[in-house]
Image (tube, rainbow, N blue to C red):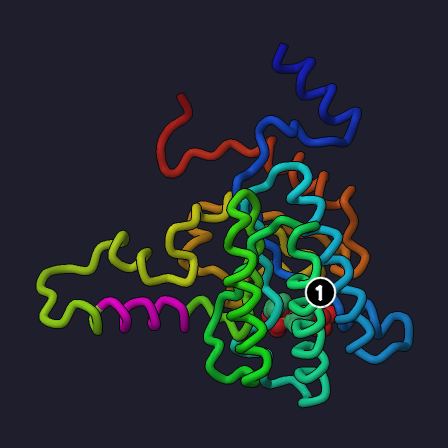
């Protein structure tokens, strides 16, 4: 039975939709190289990457993945040329404008995770509006990490905890810290996908991915399709998650 089931899944190339990960995280990488290969400016790669993100968000919602968290701009990405940073922020604005317009059609809750302080007042206003108006759709959630860094998040959480618990004595528990992470209240990612060929986390969800299954692919993000997503999900379903224990 087990063998038959495995064969059937492989033949169809489709995951078993009855046992999907609850939370998938993706590092949106490879936009620049995608553009370079075509002799285009890097911002053209980001624009196509933003389209891929829309397609994947819809696909994940449709197949029943509860949480999709994407890494769109890291705390280190400010090192890039101003023109490129501006182009990425503009794409985020476009996405949020569209998300508010199409809220009822999409029915997805949107959260932006990261230190939003350095963002433009207009972007901050749009983020607040999108988060508020989309909060009535709790069934599927998309988190976009912007000015996000895993180390910064952990430090920020610890600072918030001690600010709100002055005089706290004894040790800080994992639950204490969890409650102040940007991802407070969400399940940890079951599966982390990195397209673009690099095999590193680049400061993404360092705390939350302690037991995530990692999946790397050379496909550049703008080329990533629903078939690539299916392949990642099939790979996830073949993994044996032990969480430090022994197999039953
Ligand atoms: C990912 O694509 C998008 C961001 C980091 C904002 P890159 O821009 O890193 O693309 P490559 O890695 O240079 O190809
Ligand atoms: C990670 O990609 C950040 C995002 C995708 C937002 P980078 O392209 O910035 O990572 P490195 O520099 O290759 O590690
Ligand atoms: Mg990159």
Image coords of residue 151 (percent x, y)? 41, 70
Q: Nearer the viewer, residue 174 or 182?
A: 182
Name the residue tied to disc 1.
98
Q: Residue at x 88, y 77 (%)?
A: 40
Q: State the image quarter where residue 235 is shown.
A: top right
Residue furthest to the right in view is: 38
Image coords of residue 248 (percent x, y)? 40, 21
Residue 178 is at least partly visible in this image: yes
Q: Image check: 153 left or right of 15?
A: left
**Residue 2 versus residue 162 in the image, above or below:** above
Residue furthest to the top in view is: 1
Image coords of residue 48 (percent x, y)? 80, 65
Q: Image check: 97 left or right of 236?
A: right
**Residue 182 versus residue 18 in the image, above or below:** below
Pointer 1: residues within 10 angstroms few (<14), some, or many (20+)?
A: few
Q: State the image quarter where residue 125 is shown.
A: bottom right
Q: Nearer the viewer, residue 123 or 132?
A: 132
Magenta stretch in the rendered image: 152-161
Q: Residue at x 52, y 63 (%)?
A: 131
Q: Is residue 236 magenta?
A: no
Image coords of residue 23 (percent x, y)? 53, 45
Main structural element of the magenta stretch: helix, strand or loop?
A: helix
Q: Image check: 48 left or right of 125?
A: right
Q: State the image quarter where residue 155 is shown.
A: bottom left
């Amino acid at each position: 039975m087990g063998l038959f089931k495995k064969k059937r899944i492989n033949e169809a190339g489709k995951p078993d939709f009855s046992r999907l990960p609850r939370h998938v995280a993706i590092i949106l990488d490879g936009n620049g190289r995608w553009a370079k290969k075509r002799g285009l400016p890097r911002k053209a790669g980001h624009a196509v990457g933003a389209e891929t993100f829309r397609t994947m968000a819809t696909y994940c919602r449709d197949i029943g993945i509860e949480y999709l968290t994407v890494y769109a701009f890291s705390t280190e990405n400010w090192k890039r040329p101003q023109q490129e940073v501006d182009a990425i922020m503009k794409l985020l604005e476009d996405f949020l404008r569209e998300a508010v317009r199409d809220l009822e059609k999409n029915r997805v809750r949107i959260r932006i995770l990261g230190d939003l302080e350095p963002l433009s007042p207009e972007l901050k206003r749009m983020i607040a509006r999108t988060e508020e108006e989309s909060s009535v759709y709790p069934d599927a959630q998309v988190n976009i990490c912007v000015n996000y860094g895993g180390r910064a998040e952990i430090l920020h959480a610890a600072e918030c905890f001690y600010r709100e618990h002055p005089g706290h004595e004894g040790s800080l528990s994992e639950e204490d810290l969890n409650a102040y992470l940007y991802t407070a209240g969400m399940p940890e990612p079951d599966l982390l996908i990195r397209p673009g060929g690099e095999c590193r986390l680049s400061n993404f969800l360092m705390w939350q991915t302690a037991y995530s299954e990692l999946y790397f692919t050379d496909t550049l993000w703008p080329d990533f399709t629903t078939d690539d997503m299916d392949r990642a999900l099939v790979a996830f379903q073949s993994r044996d998650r032990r969480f430090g224990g022994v197999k039953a």
